[in-house]
Image (cartoon, rainbow, N blue to C red):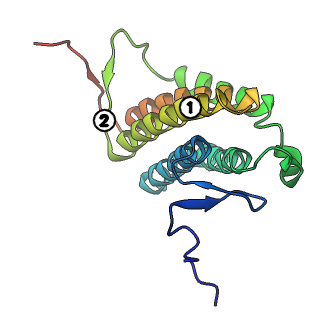
Amino acid sequence: MTKIYTRTGDRGETGLWGGSRVGKDDPRVQAYGAVDEAMSAIGAAIAALPRAASFGALRRALAEAQKELFAVGALLATPPGREKLLGRFASGPSAESVLRLEREIDAWTAELKPLRTFILPGGSVPGALLHSARTVCRRAEREVIAFSRKKPVPPGVVTYLNRLSDHLFVAARWTNRKLKVGETPWAGLT
């Protein structure tokens, strides 16, 4: 039996792909940790989606995003000189991945009423979880940008995370519409 615990991180360090060790508070670890959180938040949203066929395309789109985020996390966890371990993912998400997200955003947006004001995150449980995943994705984007100021990050990573957060926002709105749960407009401070 393989044990999940190794005790190698008990002193505040973690291993990167390829064997080198860094502190758990290293900007690289912060970046791929936030990407991992985004992937998990999307998983929670997927779990909450109805099993109805009308949500099948959304479920597949979100599952694809999880796979891409896993590759992004692996890329961020790989120290310079070890990129060959990643094969075709060594240069980050493909331009096609970003275009796919944009096509899905456009298709869902076509079914929505245009926004005339800011909305408060929420609505249905899966809609609220998608909004939550969006905010985690935005944090991952910020962490990756902070890390990129210290070490090079393929440019497609930031673009992908930026587009994915937009994707999750529109997915939340689309989900709430499909579930017939209204959005709460932000009315300003009262």
Circle 1: element type: helix
Please name the residue shown 74% across and 26% down the image: 155
Residue 89 percent across, percent down from the top left: 82, 44
Q: Describe residue 14's horizontal placement relative to residue 127 as left or right.
A: right
Q: Describe residue 139's horizontal placement relative to residue 94 as left or right.
A: left
**C-alpha span from label 2 to label 1:** 22 Å
Residue 107 percent across, percent down from the top left: 61, 25
* Local crowd size for mark 1, using a 10 Å CA cut-off: few (<14), some (14–19), many (≥20): many
The vertical placement of 150 against 115, above or below, is below
Residue that extends furthest to the bottom in the rendered view of this protein = 1
Residue that extends furthest to the top in the rendered view of this protein = 116
Q: Nearest the camera: 123 or 37?
A: 37
Residue 123 appears in the figure: yes
Residue 152 percent across, percent down from the top left: 74, 31
N-terminal-most mark, 2 or 1: 2
Q: Describe residue 88's horizontal placement relative to residue 190 as left or right.
A: right
Q: Closer to the camera: disc 2 or disc 1?
A: 1
The quarter in which the C terminus is drawn is top left
Please name the residue shown 77% across and 37% down the image: 92
The quarter in which the N terminus is drawn is bottom right
Q: Which label was assigned to residue 96?
A: none
Please name the residue shown 38% across and 35% down the image: 176
Please name the residue shown 88% across and 45% down the image: 88
Residue 101 appears in the figure: no
Label 1: which residue?
A: 141
Residue that extends furthest to the left in the rendered view of this protein = 190
Label 2: which residue?
A: 122
Q: Amino acid at mark 2?
A: Gly
Quarter residue 161 falls in: top right
* Local crowd size for mark 2, using a 10 Å CA cut-off: few (<14), some (14–19), many (≥20): many
Q: Nearest the camera: 176 or 93?
A: 93
